[in-house]
Image (tube, rainbow, N blue to C red):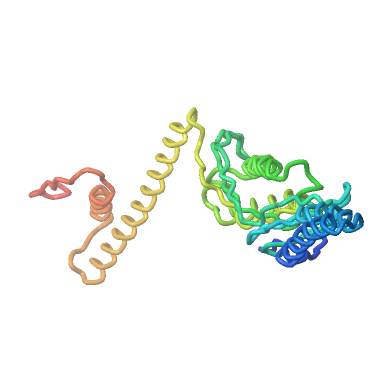
């Protein structure tokens, strides 16, 4: 299934780079040491400019230190400067950017949404219980942060809505000819759910990795009735196959008897034999044969 269905947005992600945090940290340490040296030297040799330079150097070093941050694997930082989006850093490690920038970290790891059991009506109006699990990850950090208020809550709400919509679009079971049903066509239903979720969640910069139903059953109030219906249908199907097999066996027996001329049977004897064989083959209980010592015509 093609999952490259991310919507276009004015807030599309803009990759950006960050400086090495170790380099900036080294510079800041040297500045702090230098500032202290300038203050002490100025105090000893009584040079006011040296003291002023040292006093200014130390706060500048501290200010630069505020720009240091770390990023773990599968984590990004969205940079915001005075309310304006300035790009997304996806590098890992110890990094540095302008201390005035707000660095909003966002996880790029795959996440699981284990949905609650929902009570909905299927295509035929039967109440059913349904639940799904969704595996998703953030694909576009700018859309996730700026296009929706809370992307994790957005995923949860839209997932529930998609599952409800899916359940009402399919019958639970035993549909018409070539009709997809929730119970009999699970793979197709899961694929439809994943496609619908991707269309909904692409607005939040989210990619749906996998979506599948984890629970599917009739609601308790009709479960017993539907179970009896399924049992009755199973009995009818089984009986149909038994009768078809029995008829085939009887037909084969008559053909073989006639071909090998084991015994000559008129229409009345054929009818009696067919009746007896069908009783034996189709009966549920054990058959107790009765030996006929007379004649069919007696």
Residue extending furthest toward the bottom: 260
Q: Quadrant of residue 225?
A: top left
Which quarter of the figure is the N terminus placed in? bottom right
Which residue appears at 43% of the width and 37% of the height? 227
Q: Quadrant of residue 34?
A: bottom right
x and y, in percent, of residue 259 in the image:
26, 71
Which residue appears at 83% of the width and 61% of the height? 14
Is residue 206 visible from the viewing direction of this image? Answer: yes
Which residue appears at 44% of the width and 41% of the height? 230
Q: Nearer the viewer, residue 153 or 95?
A: 95
Q: Nearer the viewer, residue 243 or 267?
A: 243
Q: Nearer the viewer, residue 3 or 234?
A: 3
x and y, in percent, of residue 123 in the image:
63, 40
Is residue 8 visible from the viewing direction of this image? Answer: no
Residue extending furthest toward the right: 49
Residue extending furthest toward the left: 293
x and y, in percent, of residue 83 in the image:
88, 47
Q: Give the total of numbered labels.
A: 0
Which residue appears at 86% of the width and 51% of the height? 81
Q: Residue 93 vs residue 47: left or right? A: left
x and y, in percent, of residue 53 in the image:
88, 57
Residue extending furthest toward the front: 45
């Amino acid at each position: 299934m093609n999952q490259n269905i991310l919507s276009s947005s004015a807030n599309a992600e803009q990759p950006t780079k960050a400086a090495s945090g170790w380099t900036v940290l080294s510079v800041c340490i040297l500045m702090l040491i230098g500032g202290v040296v300038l203050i002490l030297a100025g105090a000893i040799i009584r040079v006011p400019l040296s003291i002023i330079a040292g006093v200014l150097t130390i706060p500048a070093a501290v200010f630069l230190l505020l720009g240091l941050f770390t990023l773990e694997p599968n984590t990004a930082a969205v940079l915001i400067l005075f309310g304006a989006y300035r790009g997304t850093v996806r590098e890992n490690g110890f990094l540095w950017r302008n201390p005035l920038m707000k660095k909003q970290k966002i996880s790029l790891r795959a996440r699981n949404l284990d949905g609650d059991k929902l009570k909905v009506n299927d295509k035929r109006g039967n109440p059913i219980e349904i639940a799904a699990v969704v595996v998703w990850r953030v694909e576009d950090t700018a859309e996730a942060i700026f296009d929706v208020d809370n992307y994790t809550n957005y995923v949860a709400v839209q997932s529930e809505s998609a599952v409800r919509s899916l359940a009402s679009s399919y019958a639970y079971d035993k549909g018409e000819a070539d009709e997809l049903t929730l119970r009999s066509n699970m793979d197709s239903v899961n694929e439809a759910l994943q496609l619908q979720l991707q269309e909904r969640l692409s607005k939040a910069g989210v990619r749906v990795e996998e979506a599948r139903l984890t629970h599917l059953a009739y609601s308790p109030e009709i479960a017993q009735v539907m179970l009896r219906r399924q049992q009755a249908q199973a009995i009818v199907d089984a009986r149909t196959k038994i009768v078809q097999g029995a008829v085939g066996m009887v037909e084969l027996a008559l053909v073989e008897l006639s071909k090998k001329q084991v015994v000559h049977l008129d229409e009345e004897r054929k009818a009696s034999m067919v009746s007896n064989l069908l009783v034996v083959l189709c009966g549920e209980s054990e058959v107790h044969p009765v030996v006929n010592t007379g004649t069919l015509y007696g």
